[in-house]
Amino acid sequence: MPYYHKMAKPQIAQTNKYNVFRCLVREGPINRAAIARLTDLSIPSVMAIINNFLKKRVVRSVGKGESSGGKPPEMLEIVPDCFFYIGVDVGRTTIRVVANNMKSEQIAHINEPTGVPFPEKRFVGRLCGLITGIARQLNAGADRILGAGIAMPGLIEKETGKVLFSPDFGWSDVPLKEWLQELLPFPVFVENANRALALNEAYSPDEENHTSFTVNLGYGIGAGLVIGEELYIGASGTSGEIGHITVVKNGPVCQCGNRGCLEAVASGEAIARQARELVRQGGAAKIAALCGGNGHGIDARLVFQAAAGGDEGAARIIDRAAEYIGIGLAMAVNVLDPDRVVLCGGLMKNGGDFFEKICAALQKHKMRQSSRQMVVTAGKGGEYSTANGACRVLGSNLWWERALPI
Ligand SMILES: [Zn+2]
């Protein structure tokens, strides 16, 4: 049955304005006729909107473009610092906040240890403090901040921005968006952190319509699927939970309550747990030496370090994790047939041949005929990839949230 989206007049005007704005951000420098073509608007409508943007100093002229017969058209681009996005990566160990301009350039950033996320309301108050802190650094009024995007690990209810369940944080039913929105004068949007990361890593203007599957290998394991420029969310918003597919029947208990999940045997937390167990049993002398006998001090980074130093027990833990990750990826690749698989996250920062081992396991376990053109790469977005992704999520969702303040 055809579906017609009916909008009231002010809504249509607002949507047209937003489409022209997005077009300038994505395609600029661009001329008026090209904007009209891409947005399906009439030239007079585009001219009226652009005149308003010029008056408000949101757009500027950058000279003449190439003529297609008549007189050369005036080329326009967005004024980069006319507006800002704030992106927050709420990681289990570190909170990273960025402020990006309309050209996705980072203008400011703040990092600080996550600490104890309880009581939840006080933690959210702290997040609010960080967001207003970075907003102050911008020296811009609240009307020039288009919104704050929050990338949060766990299951997020899309419509309400509520954190339904976050095993990393031990949170259930926390109305994160509602609480932040009560405190902040600009729109707030909450997205799953792995999906925000996936959106940032998939972004490549030269590769339209690519399908990329980005996996975050860190304290936990999650993933996001991006088709073209769109995040795939799923019917109930829980897509991408590759960390919770079963790879070991009757394996260790996972934070989700099941047994033998990929995350329970191959995440940073699982690697550290296995090493602690090994040290307790008197094995893995190098790990024991590195942590100075303090088993609580063992994290995944230390296990990688011990393996690189020739500790066989540590090497076995790492090899097994790489094998399981390869098995999990093979399942996803067989089902999704992506153009590209991107591997990101803390575990990828430990050097060695972890990446190669995962690739080898993936090749071994996937169906030989599937995804023959597929490329597997390491993520390129760096430390702020998830926070930048939170800004991108805002860019694609904001127009439902609030009228553009121009
Ligand atoms: Zn699980």
Image: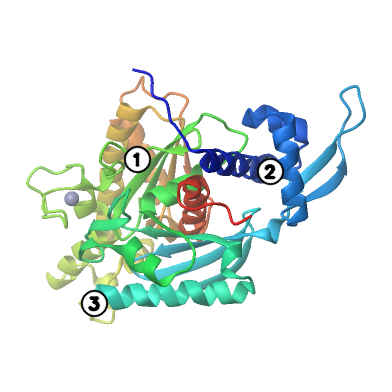
Labels 2 and 1 touching (C-beta < 8 A): no
Q: Amino acid at mark 3?
A: Pro
Q: Residue at x 35, y 29 (%)?
A: 336
The Cα atoms of the two marked residues, 2 and 1, are separated by 27 Å
Image quarter where the N terminus lies is top left
Q: Which mark is residue 98?
A: none
Q: Is residue 378 visible?
A: no
Could you tell whether 97 is left or right of 106 in the image?
left
Q: Position of residue 25 (x, y in %)?
A: 65, 46
Q: Position of residue 66 (x, y in %)?
A: 87, 31
Q: Residue at x 31, y 27 (%)?
A: 334
**Which residue in the rendered view is the most extreme toward the front?**
9
Q: Which mark is residue 119?
A: 3
Q: Residue at x 34, y 31 (%)?
A: 333
Residue at the spot of label 2: 24
Q: Which mark is residue 233?
A: 1
The Cα atoms of the two marked residues, 3 and 1, are separated by 29 Å
Q: Earlier in the sequence, mark 3 or mark 2?
A: 2
